[in-house]
Image (cartoon, rainbow, N blue to C red):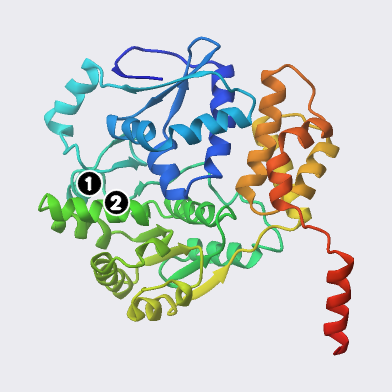
Amino acid sequence: MTQEVTNEIVETTPEHEQLWKATSQVLRGQVSEAVWFSTFNDAVAVADDKMSLRLRVPNTFVRDRILTRYMSLVRGALDEIGASGRELRVDVQTATAFDVLERLAPETQQTLDEPLIFERESGQKHQQSDVQSQRTRGGKGAAVGLNPRYTFDTFVKGASNQFSLAAALRVAETPGRSYNPLFIYGSAGLGKTHLLHAIGYYVHEHYPDLEVRYVSTETFLNEYVDGIRNNTIAAFKRRYREVDVLLIDDIQFMEGKEGLQEEFFHTFNSLHGANKQIVISSDRVPDAIPTLEDRLRGRFRWGLITDIQPPDMETRLAILRNKTERDGTTISSDVLEFIASNVTSNIRELEGALIRTVAYASLNKIAVDVELAKTLLTDLLTKNSVKPRTDEQLLAEIAEFVGF
């Protein structure tokens, strides 16, 4: 394992892209959405020799976090897709001289500790200095933290999610006027984060003057702590209280954090009082979040609370077919049906199972068939299987039912 900071220009190759894509899908099923987006989402596999995987990350903070916390997970993911034994390298792409000169230009000089934003007008990423200065430069219309892959067009509708999807569409079409707040809950990997991004992307496309911000609760906490530490809490408050649509993910991580709950309570009141849209996701209903303040629970009930359930067989199959089409992958129906029938817990694991199977076959130059899928997905099949009841268990259940 090596680590370095470099401004070397290195291109990626389809083989390395596919290797990292398969690895990251396995990883994504093992970490929270907050950890994924803050640590792995911007990592890129760059060309190296065939016996290594070289990741390039945007800064030393992300690099050090991977090296100190997640190396064993990355190596385990490589093992799962049949790429064990590869050397793992993590380095940081430093700014080029052009980047530095551009950053120091008076008309674009901005503070370096603020989050990246995307502006419709320029189509370029830069760093946000202040909400008011952002409005002065290009008006509103900023969309912060959105992933353009997560749209309503790429969300697969099914019986398990159709009500939440309908509510999300309604909110996106009429922000601040319907279901405020919208609270979506469900287990990990079922599409809550996808819906939050889809709402934000739709609003950004159809209401270009509105400012949209997606944030995980972990990032919200980190920015709050940084604001206190660096005496920039006023800028933090403006950042979140002057948006038009706030999408906050994994609100359950606020449990036990009294100061953070206090801050979010006032942010919520400020936005709701100005008819600004709030969308919240959680892995459980508000009443099931321990140590969440009652006043926050009450405000979450002001709007609509809706859930997403694990997808049924038809939806799982549709998700797999949709993914193969988007990725340009050709795979037989029997393999898709096998995966859909046996990986039932959540969408993240479902897509990860498909990518693991396809990547292993591609890297090892073998055909994708059901037998290969059975071999590669043993851990998932065991995890999702239901153990048959013994004769004794059946007799006991019958006796209990008839009153013996």
List x then y, in percent, for residue 137. 21, 43
Q: Which class describes the residues within 10 Å of circle 1: few (<14), some (14-19), or many (20+)?
A: some
**Amino acid type assigned to the residue bearing label 2 in the image:** Lys
List x then y, in percent, for residue 366. 77, 19
Q: Residue furthest top?
A: 49
Left or right: 149, with 366 as reference point: left
Q: Label 1: which residue? A: 134
List x then y, in percent, for residue 48. 48, 12
Q: Quick check: can you spot residue 43?
A: yes
Q: Which quadrant would residue 356 be assigned to in this image?
A: top right
Q: Nearer the viewer, residue 29 or 162?
A: 29
List x then y, in percent, for residue 186. 56, 63
Q: Label 2: which residue? A: 140
Q: Which quadrant would residue 91 be assigned to in this image?
A: top left
Q: Which quadrant would residue 252 be assigned to in this image?
A: bottom left
Left or right: 182, with 315 as reference point: left
- In the picture shown, does residue 359 fall above or below 293? above
Q: Residue furthest bottom?
A: 403
Q: Residue at x 41, y 13 (%)?
A: 10
Q: Residue at x 59, y 17 (%)?
A: 15
Q: Which class describes the residues within 10 Å of circle 2: few (<14), some (14-19), or many (20+)?
A: many
SS at circle 1:
helix
Q: Quick check: can you spot residue 209?
A: no
Q: How many tags in the picture?
A: 2
Left or right: 18, with 205 as reference point: right
**Amino acid type assigned to the residue bearing label 1 in the image:** Gln
Whether residues under marks 1 and 2 lie with C-beta atoms below 8 angstroms apart, the answer is: yes
Q: Quarter holding the N terminus?
A: top left
Q: Quarter holding the C terminus?
A: bottom right
- In the picture shown, does residue 74 fall above or below 91? below
Q: Residue at x 46, y 53 (%)?
A: 206
Residue 310, numbered label? none
